[in-house]
Amino acid sequence: MKFEAINFQRKYALFDEQWLPKVIAEMNDYQFKIVRLEGEFVWHSHADTDEAFVVIEGELRIALREGEVVLKAGEMDVVPRGVEHKPSAESEAKVLLIEPRGVLNTGDACTERTAPLDVWI
Amino acid sequence: MKFEAINFQRKYALFDEQWLPKVIAEMNDYQFKIVRLEGEFVWHSHADTDEAFVVIEGELRIALREGEVVLKAGEMDVVPRGVEHKPSAESEAKVLLIEPRGVLNTGDACTERTAPLDVWI
């Protein structure tokens, strides 16, 4: 029996909306979520967890209070718990997030940018 | 201050050896490990954890007792805990593993293929 791999680009092709992460896989109590990002997000932090960003396509800028990190396709970074950060992308970036189940995109601040959890695609 | 992203290919360029995972990042008690795979590995399973495979370059075949999954660059899969699997690659594949700190590559079987843990690059 052939099991099907999870193909990032085929998953992205299933939706257009930005800033709304979609779960594509789970590992223990962690989730792999893909998201399309464009423009500026809000400053936020996650008090209880680190958060991993992997760029699949495009360029992601993560502003930190002490500087910034710019991630291109084929690059990743981990924002430690409690560290304020603000993702942004000049043009659309396709990003893979890895973090525990139940982590809100806006972290400790619930705003109009807060996305629903556990939306699978 | 500009922080440097973790670039997969630049990390791979730092080593040649196969089947010896190198840690490139940690997220909570999970590790991101890169490895070069070629040829056949051993059947094994991890009783206590799922294991995520992301292919960065090349093609990875994961044999399962009930079939197989073939992963190309830009694809991933998660092998659930307790499920026996045997990775292989006809030609060298560059793979990103994500799993809890302390997981041995050979799972519950300690063999001559067992790689040391916590080797950072």
Image (spheres, coloured by chain):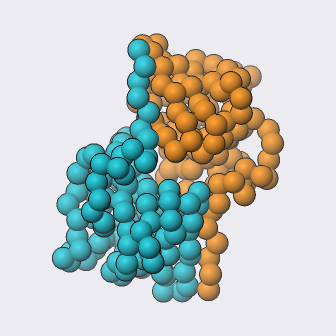
Chain colours: A orange, B cyan
- Using the rendered view, name the quadrant where residue A26 is placed: bottom right
Q: Residue at x 30, y 71 (%)?
A: B107
Q: Position of residue B64 (x, y in %)?
A: 49, 81
Camera-side residue of A71 and A35: A71
Q: Is residue B10 above or below residue B57?
A: above
Let me know if residue A118 appears in the view: no
Left or right placement of residue A99 versus residue B31 in this view? right
Q: Quadrant of residue A80?
A: top left
Task: State left or right for residue A52 relative to residue B34.
Answer: right
The x, y position of residue A59, in whole percent, is 60, 33
Name the one closer to the observer, A106 or B16: B16
| Horizontal side of residue B45 vs A93, given as left or right | left
- Asked whether residue A4 is in view, the answer is yes
- The residue depicted at 75 percent of the width and 35 percent of the height is A18
Q: Tell me if residue A118 comes above or below residue A66 in the rendering.
A: below
Residue A98 position within the rendered picture, expressed as x and y whole percent measured from the top left: 52, 45
- Residue at position x 79%, y 53% from top? A14
In the figure, A67 relative to A34: above or below? above
- Image quadrant assignment for residue A91: top right
